[in-house]
Amino acid sequence: MTLAYAPGDSLAHRLDPRAKLLVQAGFAAAVYATTSPHGLLLATPLAAGCLWAAGGGLDDVRAFRFALPVLLGAPVVAGVTLGEPWIRPARAATTALASYRVGLILVVTAAYVRSTAVRESRAAVHHTVPGRLGAMAGLGVALVFRALPLLRADLHRAHEAVHARGGGARPVYVRMRAVAVVGVRRTLTRADRLGTAMTARCLSWNPTLPALSFGRLDAVALALGFGLVAVAVASG
Amino acid sequence: MIDVSGVTVRYGTAPNGGGGSEPPEAKTASGVAAVEDVSLRIDDGEFVVLVGANGSGKTTLVRTFNGLVTPTEGTVSVDGTPVESDLVSARSAVGMVFQTPRDQFVAPTVAADVAFGPENLGLPREEIDRRVAAALDAVDLTGRDDARIATLSGGERQRAAIAGAIAMAPTHLVCDEPFTGLDEPSRRTVLDRLRSLAADGTGVVVVTHDLRDVVGLADRLVGLNDGRLVVDGPPAAVAADLTDHGVRVPIADHERG
């Protein structure tokens, strides 16, 4: 499955997207600044809490399974040496902590994505970053959210097409090349068509975006976000 | 009213000012005219079927209606205003549903996508919500606001694309091959929606190479062959002439008589 916005009425759904972005940024900064296992242990229930507040669960985290081999493999690659002493546990542990940090951030990201409509993200960026830069960044965010699932679907279809005609018998590099070439070509074609479709519907730098306003709940989220930023600064 | 006057579109020799991509027609007419000296008037509330074989210039022609393609020669006006002089007005007035709706959705959910156009017009939120609700109602997708585009059937997807276009409150709706890949019930549903829109006063232009479903609805048939307008008139008068004019149109057996 692909991680995507899921309409709902959870705690996180009711929050202003700017407050959620602050929590996410604060969380990322805090866990990166935290080098001790204890600190990361404390961050774990917070990450799980964010996902719970967004009405999410393991299914949402599963969307990041493609990152799992890298996160699990990194400590092994970092710890193994080609000569004596063959394994360096300290290096492996440091990298394992780094992988764990990334995992925690992905969990909080999942909470944000499933509880925030793309238009709200665009509005949040548009309102937060002033001027044309904010409008461009907002549109960029919206397009990335739109394009990534399509890109993945295109690559998946290319993969299926290769296998449907016995491509599985070919060497891995041949299959990878076929999928990549077809996938990129389809993506470019799709991007071209999408651009035309947006032009036809009067793509604007300053569209009517969802009205954003902070409520009481946001005060809690903002406090949490600023607190996390403070932790990051204090730890750094 | 859409007024096309002496329009010629040549690819490879003229800039594509509207930002559109080179459509399939151009590939067969690379460096030559995809549309040549076409004049045409489409009145408000008229149901026009634009027919022609692949590569005959249909898509290129309709893309000049809202400035996605800029004519090399000639002019296109919408409600008396030249398209190039006010692209936003032209694109609001001429809604377009593309041949592959899948590629035209810009948001992951139905309501968000339908709202995209009105948002770009800078309308107040209440008006946008009203238009989205009305557009979804017009295509029988009420209550599917939060449905993910990826989960829609082919027919629903086509209708969602139509909703995205009519939410702009166009005076004309152009549908490029709207029945491609649809099963019979889905074709019927889309056809019913187009019929309703026409009955409500929206001019409808259907681009197709298959007359089976739409010939009974059309006020006019316009035929293109190699970029030139070769047939223009009421279906009863001109349908039989289509093949004589080199327009390759597969007509179902029951309509051949």
Image (cartoon, helix red, strand yellow):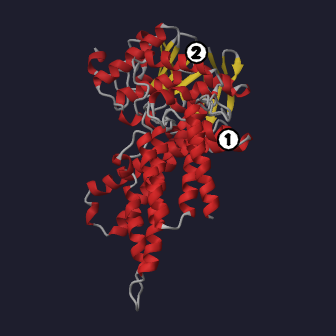
Which-is-in-front pick, marks 2 and 1?
Answer: 1
Residue type highlighted by circle 1:
Thr
Q: Chain of mark 2?
A: B
Q: Please, is residue B200 above or below residue A18 in the view?
A: above
Q: Residue B141: image x %, image y %?
A: 40, 21
Q: Residue furthest bottom?
A: A84
Q: Which residue is mark 1?
A: A128
Residue under numbered circle 2: B171
Q: Which residue occupies the foreground of this view, B34 or B18?
A: B18
Q: Residues within 10 Å of mark 1 (few under 14, many from 20)?
A: few
Instruction: Name the one closer to the observer, B136 or B84.
Output: B136
Residue B140 lies left or right of residue A213; in this view the side is left
Q: Quadrant of the image for the C terminus of chain A?
A: bottom right
Q: Position of residue B184 (x, y in %)?
A: 29, 23
Q: Residues within 10 Å of mark 2 (few under 14, many from 20)?
A: many
- For image coordinates 46% across by 54% down, the residue present is A106
- In 3D space, how far apart are the residues under numbered discs 2 and 1 (Cα atoms)? 37 Å
Residue A230 x %, y %: 63, 54
* Callout 2–callout 1 Cβ contact below 8 Å: no
Identity of the residue drawn at 34% across and 48% down: A58
- Name the secondary structure under disc 1: helix
Report the residue at 52% width, 40% height from top.
A193
Query: Are dots 2 and 1 on a single chain?
Result: no
Asked whether residue B44 appears in the rendered view, the answer is yes
Instruction: Quadrant for residue A92, please give it.
Output: bottom left
